[in-house]
Image (cartoon, rainbow, N blue to C red):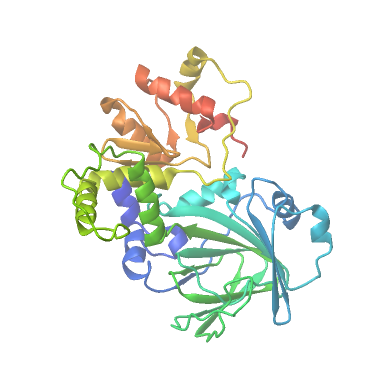
């Protein structure tokens, strides 16, 4: 806990001299922040050809956006290599979602934003654009950090209330955009934008934008998923009955007494904060539909794993997420059945996404081994750098 407090009170390198507490108090979901030189060392270089190859994978979400005068064209991947060879020299953008799932050093960038709860952290998208490349003036419904990697990009931003969109466009392009501020971002510069803050980025030189996005489900989505969650867990006793039924001259009418009886039955559906926490644990750690885990090709047996585990660090797979509330832990949409005495160990694993421990209880060892053979976590020594 002391380490967490120290982190909150110490200036964060990504925040331009601000502490996380200052950033959350003054900027988070309130106003933009431009941070010069936020991150100049982004690890091994990723070039556009590598990004194009990733955009060709079946399990990767990717898009190609072209601007042709006043017209916009949107294509969704996977893409054949030949598609990129036909692109002009300007005015297009390739966007690839969740690159952190595929590149360890990109994954490490994402988790540097740990001053925001993991429950809100979504993914790191990379976009590449030559001069003129843009996705148009728009706004996002979630918070985003836009990190420039190579090249130069001009961002215009606006706090405008006019959110009308261009009719018939394949993208959510703002019909009217009234720029209030303009920034030229070069390598290592980063711009934070709160939700629904209009922005318009246009590449001035070939380069990439690393977009760190945050989950912000709508109330409708939460309600729908919560009802599904309840459906799988509620058991209401009894059956509709009406022994006091009387003759009705209008047999097609839904009678008031039936409505009252059903209303009384449904009022037995109740929930509390514990129910909501359990729902969020399952819902927020549930992998996206296109995500699959890679079990080890030749897994160790349990005894070998136990020996190796006592001498080597385990790390979460980039696609894995552990969240917890009190002594309840959730991983990849499942509740983990853990021994109460090991709660602190699992919370440590969840927070650090890395676990070093010379000895484990048999219960924890069993669970760690199950996760290992499922591909939920792996040994740090096996992670490509």
Residue 131 image point, x, y percent: 72, 73
Residue pictured at 56% horizontal, 35% vertical = 293
Q: Quadrant of the N terminus?
A: top left
Q: Is residue 371 left or right of residue 93?
A: left
Residue at the top extreme? Answer: 303
Question: In the rendered image of this protein, does residue 2 appear above or below residue 156?
Answer: above
Q: Quadrant of the C terminus?
A: top right
Q: Is residue 8 left or right of residue 304?
A: left
Can I make out residue 358 in this image?
Answer: no
Question: In the rendered image of this protein, does residue 208 appear above or below residue 121?
Answer: below
Residue 301 image point, x, y percent: 53, 15
Residue pictured at 53% horizontal, 76% vertical = 199
Residue 351 image point, x, y percent: 38, 42
Q: Is residue 274 left or right of residue 226?
A: left
Residue nearest the observer in this picture, 369 or 77 = 77
Residue nearest the observer in this picture, 357 or 130 = 130
Residue at the left extreme? Answer: 244
Residue nearest the observer in this picture, 215 or 1 = 215
Q: Quadrant of residue 207?
A: bottom right
Question: In the rendered image of this protein, does residue 33 appear above or below residue 114?
Answer: below
Residue pictured at 70% horizontal, 82% vertical = 70
Can I make out residue 17 in this image?
Answer: yes
The image shows a total of numbered marks equal to 0
Residue 108 image point, x, y percent: 52, 47
């Amino acid at each position: 806990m002391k380490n967490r407090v120290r982190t909150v009170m110490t200036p964060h390198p990504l925040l331009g001299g601000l502490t996380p507490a200052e950033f959350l108090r003054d900027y988070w979901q309130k106003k933009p922040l431009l941070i010069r030189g936020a991150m100049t060392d982004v690890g091994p270089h990723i070039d556009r050809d590598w990004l194009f190859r990733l955009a060709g994978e079946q399990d990767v979400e990717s898009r190609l956006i072209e601007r042709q005068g006043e017209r916009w064209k949107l294509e969704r991947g996977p893409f054949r290599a030949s598609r990129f060879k036909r692109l002009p020299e300007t005015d297009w953008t390739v966007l690839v979602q969740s690159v952190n799932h595929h590149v360890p050093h990109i994954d490490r960038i994402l988790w540097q934003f740990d001053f925001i709860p993991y429950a809100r952290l979504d993914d790191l998208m990379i976009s590449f654009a030559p001069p003129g490349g843009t996705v148009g003036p728009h706004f996002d419904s979630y918070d985003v950090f836009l990190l420039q990697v190579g090249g130069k990009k001009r961002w215009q931003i606006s706090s405008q209330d006019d959110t009308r969109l261009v009719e018939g466009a394949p993208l959510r392009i703002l019909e009217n955009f009234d720029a209030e501020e303009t920034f030229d971002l070069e390598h290592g510069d980063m711009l934070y934008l709160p939700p629904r803050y209009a922005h318009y980025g246009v590449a001035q030189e070939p380069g990439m934008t690393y977009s760190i996005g945050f989950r912000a489900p709508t109330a409708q989505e939460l309600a729908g998923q919560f009802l599904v969650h309840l459906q799988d867990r509620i058991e209401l006793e009894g059956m509709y009955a009406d022994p006091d039924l009387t003759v009705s001259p209008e047999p097609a009418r839904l009678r008031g007494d039936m409505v009252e009886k059903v209303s009384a039955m449904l009022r037995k559906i109740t929930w509390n904060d514990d129910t909501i926490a359990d729902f969020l644990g399952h819902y927020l750690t549930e992998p996206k539909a296109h995500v699959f885990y890679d079990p080890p090709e030749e897994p160790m047996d349990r005894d070998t794993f136990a020996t190796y585990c006592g001498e080597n660090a385990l790390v979460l797979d980039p696609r894995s997420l552990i969240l917890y509330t009190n002594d309840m832990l959730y991983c990849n949409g499942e509740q983990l059945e853990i021994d109460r005495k090991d709660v602190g160990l699992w919370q440590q694993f969840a927070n650090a996404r890395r676990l070093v421990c010379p000895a484990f209880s048999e219960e924890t060892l069993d669970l760690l081994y199950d996760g290992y053979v499922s591909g939920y976590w792996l040994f740090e020594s096996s992670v490509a750098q």
